[in-house]
Image: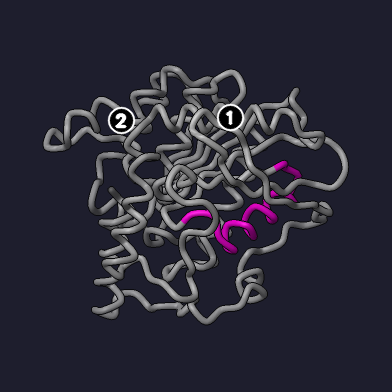
């Protein structure tokens, strides 16, 4: 999985001096907030922690939306480190731009609440990595779980007073959330009209050495089921070095269905978007964010 492989590549980069560690472990919430550039004329927002009924139990999530009016809904799939202060801030930033944003805990079947603390943990530490990969497996390796979770989440969003159900739903996925974003567009095609993946792993599993089940469940094979109007695939440069053909496979899959897609390799390393990442890149994160807003504007 890209999250494990490329995070370890990042660690080797720190050791060799190719990358500089930002030291987010000591950063306060205020310092993280300073890294999430505020939109012009931001909406006043309200926020709450919620629980959503699914066939497998109650999925905990974070919801933030403009305090007045009705807005397009967005479902956010976080990376392998789950819902945490950085993703709450990213949700707030998106809500201030005029969206009703639900960030879900994809690990709720095994653990509720925050599963990773960027101030005290590193993904590269073997015990931390093994624990998070264990939490990830039921979500990423089982497309049916994604279908159940996405269906429940969007049904919950459609019941909220702040959601404009006459508009399409957007979805984003970071790292392991990339495949979940793709599945969401396929499993809820009549509602989800725009999607974006940021340094997503496993969007196209075509390597003949990969397990047959992974190849059969490759997210790019779901594109014919989608009805999206705009899609963004933002690729990390070190992900692309390790799998240089994946982006072309994904681009071709969308082109075959006449679904507008923007695929770009960014000059930044895996994990560059969340502000608590050790490889956070402010300039490239802001550029990716601008493209996200453009994608949602086109699709929703």
Looking at this view, name the residue that lies furthest to the front: 57
Mark number, residue 152: 1
Mark 2, residue position: 218
Vertical comparison of 238 with 54: above or below: below
Whether 66 is among the magenta residues is no
Part of the protein shown in magenta: 82-100
- What kind of element bears circle 2? loop
Looking at this view, name the residue that lies furthest to the right: 68
Mark number, residue 285: none
- The image position of residue 289, as x and y in percent, is 58, 52
- The image position of residue 159, as x and y in percent, is 74, 29
Most common SS among magenta residues? helix
Q: Residue at x 72, y 49 (%)?
A: 64
Quick check: 41 left or right of 63? right
Q: Residue at x 40, y 38 (%)?
A: 179
Vertical comparison of 248 with 274: above or below: above
Give the CA separation, mark 1 to mark 2. 22 Å
- The image position of residue 30, as x and y in percent, is 67, 75
Quick check: 207 left or right of 102? left
Q: Residue at x 24, y 46 (%)?
A: 243
- The image position of residue 2, as x and y in percent, is 30, 50
């Amino acid at each position: 999985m890209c999250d494990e492989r490329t995070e370890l590549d990042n660690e080797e980069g720190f050791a060799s001096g190719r990358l500089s560690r930002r030291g987010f472990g000591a950063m306060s919430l205020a310092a993280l907030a300073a890294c999430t550039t505020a939109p012009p004329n931001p909406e006043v927002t309200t926020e709450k922690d919620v629980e959503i009924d699914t066939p497998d139990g109650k999925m905990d999530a974070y919801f933030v939306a403009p305090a007045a009016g009705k807005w397009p809904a967005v479902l956010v799939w976080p990376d392998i480190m789950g819902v945490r202060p950085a993703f709450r801030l990213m949700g707030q930033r998106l809500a201030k731009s005029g969206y009703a944003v639900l960030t879900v805990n994809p690990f709720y079947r095994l653990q509720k609440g925050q599963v990773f603390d960027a101030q005290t943990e590193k993904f590269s530490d073997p015990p931390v990595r093994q624990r998070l990969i264990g939490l990830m497996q039921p979500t990423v390796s089982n497309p049916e779980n994604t279908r159940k979770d996405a269906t429940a989440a969007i049904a919950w969003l459609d019941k909220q007073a702040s959601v404009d159900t006459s508009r399409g739903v957007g979805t984003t996925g970071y790292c392991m959330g990339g495949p979940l974003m793709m599945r969401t567009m396929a499993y809820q095609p009549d509602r989800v009209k725009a999607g974006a993946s940021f340094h997503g792993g496993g969007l196209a599993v075509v390597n003949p050495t990969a397990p047959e089940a992974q190849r059969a469940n490759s997210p790019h094979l779901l594109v014919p089921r989608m009805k999206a109007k705009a899609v963004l695939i933002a690729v990390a440069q070190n992900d692309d070095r390790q799998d240089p053909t994946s982006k072309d496979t994904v681009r071709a899959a969308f082109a075959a269905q006449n679904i507008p897609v923007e695929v770009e390799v960014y000059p930044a390393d895996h994990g560059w978007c969340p502000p608590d990442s050790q490889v956070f890149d402010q300039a490239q994160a802001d550029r990716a964010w601008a493209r996200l807003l453009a994608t949602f504007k086109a699709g929703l």
